[in-house]
Image (cartoon, rainbow, N blue to C red):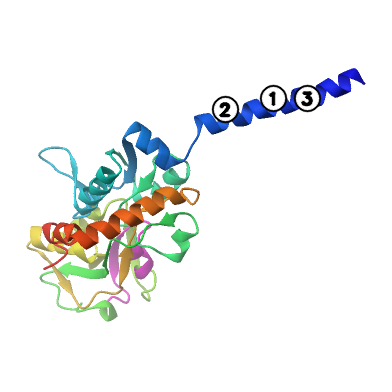
């Protein structure tokens, strides 16, 4: 009897100790960010003007970069970026390799099952880009049976798969799709309108045709069990929009013509 009484007590004491350590060592992601002054962010830095590596400085720059730094500043933190291929970026977030993702990520129902999105911070759509000497493609209706270039795991790829008879080449980075377009290996590229405009401006051999295929909203992704961090992003985005800073960033990076 004596041992039977002591054994449960020992178990209870052990459990209390474990729970106490968990609470003391844990806390929410937001609390950890406020304590360490570091916000860890995953991004695919190959998608201008949202995020890309400046060839001169080697630093990550872009609309998303400026935005998340402004949000981190409100939390008293600096941003630590982890560059990840887009097709693995949600998996990295869910396995806690970083705290959030900002990477021109469209808010979709399927993605919302895996991550929590902030309130939308901007919107655009998918556009069709062709070579300037292309004479048979004037919009999405002309893409049936054509060779198309897209970025892997993007909404551009999703839209391409809806086109009858299209032969789709998916690239790890959107730059590969546009290189193949210039080289004549694909007949068109489907990409976010701001990104397609960047390549149009920088490459005299590319132009956009037709109207955007979609209207999409971009959000910052957080883990489903991090509601406090999502709320902090929501509040920050609302304030940046109210102050006009968000519109200034859109103009800086060519979202507003």
Few, some or many residues within 10 Å of mark 3 (<14, 14–19, 20+):
few
Q: Earlier in the sequence, mark 1 or mark 3?
A: 3
Labels 2 and 3: the sequence-earlier one = 3
Q: Tell me, yes or no, whether the highlighted magenta stretch contains residue 144.
A: yes
The image position of residue 203, as x and y in percent, is: 9, 59
- Name the outermost residue toward the right: 1
Is disc 1 surrounded by few (<14), some (14 to 19) or many (20+) residues within 10 Å?
A: few
Residue 14 tag number: 1
> In terms of secondary structure, where does tag 3 sit?
helix
In the image, the segment drawn in magenta is 143-159
- Quadrant housing residue 186: bottom left
Q: Which residue is mark 2?
A: 21
Q: Which mark is residue 9?
A: 3
Of the pair 208 and 39, the residue shown nearer to us? 39
Q: Residue furthest left?
A: 204
On the image, the x and y values in percent for residue 172 come to: 31, 51
Q: Residue at x 93, y 21 (%)?
A: 1
């Amino acid at each position: 009897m004596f041992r039977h009484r002591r054994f449960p007590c020992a178990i209870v004491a052990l459990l209390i100790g474990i729970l106490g350590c968990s609470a003391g060592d844990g806390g929410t992601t937001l609390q950890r960010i406020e304590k360490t002054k570091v916000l860890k962010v995953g991004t695919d830095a190959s998608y201008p003007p949202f995020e890309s590596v400046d060839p001169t400085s080697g630093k990550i720059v872009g609309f998303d970069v400026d935005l998340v730094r402004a949000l981190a500043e409100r939390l008293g933190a600096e941003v630590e970026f982890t560059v990840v291929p887009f097709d693995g970026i949600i998996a990295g977030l869910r396995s806690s390799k970083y705290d959030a993702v900002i990477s021109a990520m469209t808010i979709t129902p399927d993605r919302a099952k895996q991550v929590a999105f902030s309130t939308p911070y901007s919107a655009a759509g998918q556009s069709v880009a062709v070579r300037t000497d292309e004479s048979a493609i004037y919009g999405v209706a002309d893409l049936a049976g054509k060779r198309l270039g897209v970025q892997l795991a993007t909404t551009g790829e999703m839209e391409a798969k809806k086109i009858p008879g299209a032969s789709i080449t998916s690239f790890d980075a959107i730059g590969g799709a546009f290189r193949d377009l210039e080289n004549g290996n694909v007949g068109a590229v489907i990409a976010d309108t701001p990104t397609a405009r960047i390549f149009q401006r920088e490459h005299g051999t590319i132009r956009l045709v037709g109207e955007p295929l979609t209207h999409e909203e971009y959000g910052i992704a957080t883990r489903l069990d991090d509601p406090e961090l999502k709320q902090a992003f929501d509040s920050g985005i609302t304030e940046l929009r109210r102050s006009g800073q968000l519109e200034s960033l859109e103009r800086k990076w060519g979202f507003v013509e």
